[in-house]
Image (tube, rainbow, N blue to C red):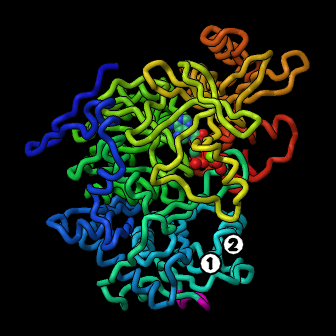
Amino acid sequence: MPPQTIRKKSEDWELVPNLLDYDAARENFSWEHELGLLDGLPGGGLNIAHEAVDRHASSDRREHLALRWLDRNGEATDFSYGDLSELSNRFANVLRDLGVQKGDRVFALSERLPALYVTALGTLKNGSVFCPLFSAFGPEPLHSRLSIGEARVLVTTESLYRRKVASLRESLPQLQYLLLVREKPQGELPDGTLDFQQLLDGAADTFPIENTGPEDPALLHFTSGTTGRPKGALHVHEAVLAHHASARLALDLHPQDIFWCTADPGWVTGTSYGIIAPLTIGATMIVDREEFEPERWYGILREQKVSVWYTAPTAVRMMMKYGTELARQFELPALRFMASVGEPLNPEAVLWGQEAFGLPFHDNWWQTETGGIMIANFLSQPIRPGSMGRPLPGIEAAIVRPSEDGSVEIIEEADQEGELALKRGWPSMFRSYLHEEERYRKCFRGDWYLTGDLARRDEDGYFWFIGRADDVIKSSGHLIGPFEVESALMEHPAVAEAAVIGVPDPMAGEIVKAFVSLKPGFEAGETLQREILALARKRLGPAVAPRQLQVEDSLPRTRSGKIMRRLLKARELGLPEGDTSTLEHPGGR
Ligand code: ATP
Ligand code: MG
């Protein structure tokens, strides 16, 4: 695919990509230089909220639109950088007045409401640690995260409080303050809670920001729980260097952009790129209160003139399910760059972007632990559909084989499979798994952080995802990565989603079993199943192709949209399902 040229977005500005020459950008990169692009605080201090908001609020960008929030009806409420600065100052004052200290953990459990963004930024200004929770969690996952994280403050909505939190309070003795956002006030506030808005209104709108150091804790994110019990990954203020650099280089964000990250701040993408990164750039970000609905989403892209769009494979698959025709009905002249993260993006989906929007999706890879994008397909470089792209400037990635003696063997040769590893020391690297020292230590071998994902690197330095180490299938001496098999299945026009697992087999050790869901208009039946299996065999050869195929209405996924292969496997083998706290439809199938 040829390199993308940048479109002229409007009459008065034209863009040059932030990264033009990949090799030169890598060579010339230094984190010191990146630090120089930010403000910093006196005496070597660094605070994410200062870089995201106050830096712009004290410049001629003060009145620039920072956040446009869309309510259920699509009505917009606008916040300039100046507004966000004052509101977050107010919230920081609220925390300080309550005696909430630097390092204390402030949790948020809220739908995407303006208060959530104010909470995040005000918490950081106070030097406290911001811990977002996904609003659709039930009481049990909430309880475990609030207690692991020793929450001192929780900002939530009145309705979520009544439905989910009230019954947990007695068993969370360290949870001192409950601040409720009242969308539709329901009589008196419940006992022992405070009114978020009232506190905000009563607080001063100036605040001497806490002079946090680069290594001071800032964010606590729980992982998606795709492979097991979620882990609490702790990040520090220095992470902002990576947020800013990756937004510039991997997402090509410019201050003129209107950026829409569709992820919820309950997950790391929705905080790193749905709050912090676009603000550090000085861009405008769109926040939609509602969930995915194709016409709504296409309408937002068009009405809000979104220029850079960051979404996830699960959303792309849904859009594909609704069809190209629908997407094409929406003219999107402002849209100039589309990226995706969270799961492997099948080549089929990359190309569908081109068909439906005239632009391909650029896949990029990272994890909660890495805090920011590590590997990406860049705007100015050719995309290799199915590849995650190349490491960002400042990031060393390698394919390694951990050895028994505790060291790692780095595989220099191209096209070899192994574990994806990153050279430690980038600013947004997690600094611990909360209360799990040993688990944290085990992720590192010498200078290398082991990601738990398997991949290979081609001779031009592009990385190709094979699967999570936990999901890889061993069949007749072959190691089979689910991604390749799933991509082949997705090529069939009837297949909407695919997931493969290994099931025990006396001869082969394991054989590949596929689960698929179908696009509307296709009926499950033996002929169709045979046809899909035949296509996979043709693409992959008999050693790798699935032997069995089962059609499901939908596949189990995490609330952040990732297919949970471990659950398919547990169900197939009649084993316990393990931690299902992040499952989208607990109990349902
Ligand atoms: P848990 O660690 O609790 O099992 P999780 O790994 O799904 O959950 P996240 O940190 O949200 O939690 O997800 C990161 C993982 O998602 C990566 O390690 C990788 O397996 C997968 N992933 C993210 N982006 C991509 C991508 N572009 N291609 C392939 N896989 C990806
Ligand atoms: Mg993980």
- The reply to whether the residue tagged 2 has its Cβ within 8 angstroms of ligand 1 is no
Our reading of the magenta stretch's main secondary structure is loop
**From which residue to which does the magenta span run?**
187-192
- Label 1 residue SS: helix
Q: Which residue is mark 2?
A: 147
Q: Callout 1 environment at 10 Å: few (<14), some (14 to 19), or many (20+)? A: few
For marks 1 and 2, give the CA distance. Answer: 19 Å
Left or right of 37? Residue 412 is: right
Query: Taking the image as drawn, is residue 80 in sight?
Result: no
Q: Callout 2 environment at 10 Å: few (<14), some (14 to 19), or many (20+)? A: some
Quadrant of the frame with the N terminus: top left
Judging depth in this view, the residue of 166 and 308 nearest the camera is 308
Judging depth in this view, the residue of 571 and 416 nearest the camera is 416
Looking at the image, residue 553 lies above or below residue 129:
above
* Residue 257 image offset from top left, x and y in percent: 24, 49
Left or right of 19? Residue 364 is: right
* Residue 83 image offset from top left, x and y in percent: 27, 73
Inspect the image, locate mark 2, and give the three-letter code of the amino acid beneath it: Ser
